[in-house]
Amino acid sequence: MCKHNGETTDHLLLHCEAVTDLWDDIFTRLGLAWVMPRKVIDLLACWRVIRGKGQIADIWKMVPLCLMRCTWNERNNRCFERKERSPGGFRDFFYHTLVLWASSILMNGTSFTELYAALSL
């Protein structure tokens, strides 16, 4: 995706230049100082510390899954459709998707688990 390194899952979802800018933007907006783990599994383990309660906690849980899903979508568009979003377009795509996921919970009263199960179908 970044055209600089081999494509491993960990590189693509955490360390690819196209994705690290977005991770940095998220952490800055959340006011977090964060050192990115080497592996996706380690990130997900660290992410378990929930910020807030109720719906805020549900949205917090969505951030890595949403970013990873958007990254995978962008990667597939680049590989198979020859379509590439600009860095700003990729960032906007992520935040738009996160808002859609969050609004689904806030407007429908669905739990994160139910929403994720519905999206996985």
Image (cartoon, rainbow, N blue to C red):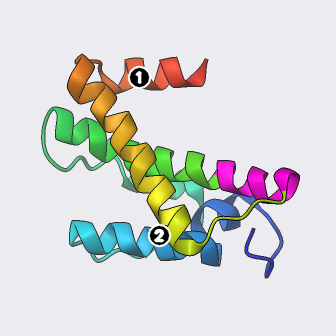
Label 1 CA crowd tier, 10 Å (few <14, some 14–19, many 20+): some
Looking at the rendered structure, the kind of residue marked 1 is: Leu
The residue at which mark 2 appears reads as 22
- Residue at image position (67%, 55%) is 74
Residue 26 or residue 57, whichever sits in front: 26
The residue lying furthest to the left in this view is: 53
What range is drawn magenta here? 72-81
Eyeballing the image, is 30 above or below 104? below
* Residue beneath the point at 19% across and 34% down: 55
Q: Are marks 2 and 1 in contact (CB under 8 Å)?
A: no
Q: Which residue is mark 1?
A: 115
Q: Is residue 39 left or right of residue 53?
A: right
Name the residue at 12% across, 38% down: 53
Q: Amino acid at mark 2?
A: Leu
Q: Is the stretch drawn in magenta largely helix, strand or loop?
A: helix
Q: Is residue 44 visible?
A: no
**In the image, residue 1 lies in the stretch drawn in magenta:** no
Which numbered circle lies on residue 36?
none
Residue depicted at 57% across the width and 69% down the height: 19
Q: Quadrant of residue 12?
A: bottom right
Q: Secondary structure at mark 1?
A: helix
| Picture quarter with the C terminus | top right
Residue 64 seen in the current view: yes
